[in-house]
Amino acid sequence: VWLVRNAKPVDVQQATPPVSHVADYEFTNFTLKSYDINGKIQSALKGTFAEHYQDTHNTLIKNPEVLIYADKKTTTAKALQAITNEDGSEVQLIGKAQVKQVNTMDQDDTQINSNFLHFYAVDDSVKTHLPVTIMNGKNTFAADAMDADNVNQTFELKGRVRVKIFPKQP
């Protein structure tokens, strides 16, 4: 009895381990789809591998393919890998990044190619600090860097810019 009374109490609370940059969960060969309230598909994300990191709340995706369906256009994005933050408001496409917008109306399709594309959902913009090529129909634009604003439908091309524009056929 004396030993129990004089012993130090055991601390039942264990110290939480420090957060480290180790994946806390992963996916293999997956497809995630999101639907609107009426059951119509809005977007799909495919990948061969993904892992989530607890310390940064980022998800690394290998071979991502994204499809976004809008009223009169479909947007696809793919790369060798992608990094996305927890709420999906920022996505970085890394390695052979390509974003293509296919229009069902009489507008030309648009495709952006670079080794790095950074998408910001809040202001619907895409930026890159690396060389980029933009194809709109037969027209091509190349630059050392780019800021694209989808809301205002503008491309700011930076550095050495090269352009090939073809006249519209009547």
Image (tube, helix red, strand yellow):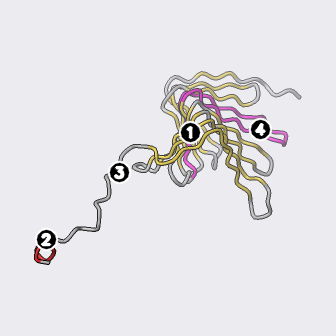
> On screen, 155 above or below 132?
below
* Front label number (1 vs 4): 1
Residue at the limit of the structure toward the front, as seen here:
1
> On screen, 45 above or below 139?
below
Q: Quadrant of the N terminus?
A: bottom left
* Mark 2 element type: loop
Mark seen at residue 19: 3
Of residues 1 and 10, the one drawn nearer to the viewer in this rendering: 1
Identify the mark nearer the N-term, 1 or 4: 1
Number of numbered markers: 4
Pointer 1 with pointer 4, Cβ within 8 A: no
Q: Quadrant of residue 22?
A: top left
- Identify the residue position indicated by label 2 in the image: 7
Asked if the magenta segment contains residue 116, the reply would be yes
Identify the mark nearer the N-term, 3 or 2: 2
Mark 3 and mark 1: Cα distance apart in space: 21 Å
- Identify the residue position indicated by label 4 in the image: 102
Mark seen at residue 61: 1
Mark 4 and mark 3: Cα distance apart in space: 42 Å
Mark 3 and mark 2: Cα distance apart in space: 33 Å
Q: Which residues are magenta?
A: 95-121
Of residues 57 and 130, the one drawn nearer to the viewer in this rendering: 57
* 103 sits to left or right of 160: right
Q: Quadrant of the C terminus?
A: top right
> On screen, 84 above or below 168?
below
Query: Label 1 is placed on what type of residue?
Result: Ile
Query: Label 2 is placed on what type of residue?
Result: Ala
Mark 1 and mark 4: Cα distance apart in space: 24 Å
Of residues 95 and 101, the one drawn nearer to the viewer in this rendering: 95
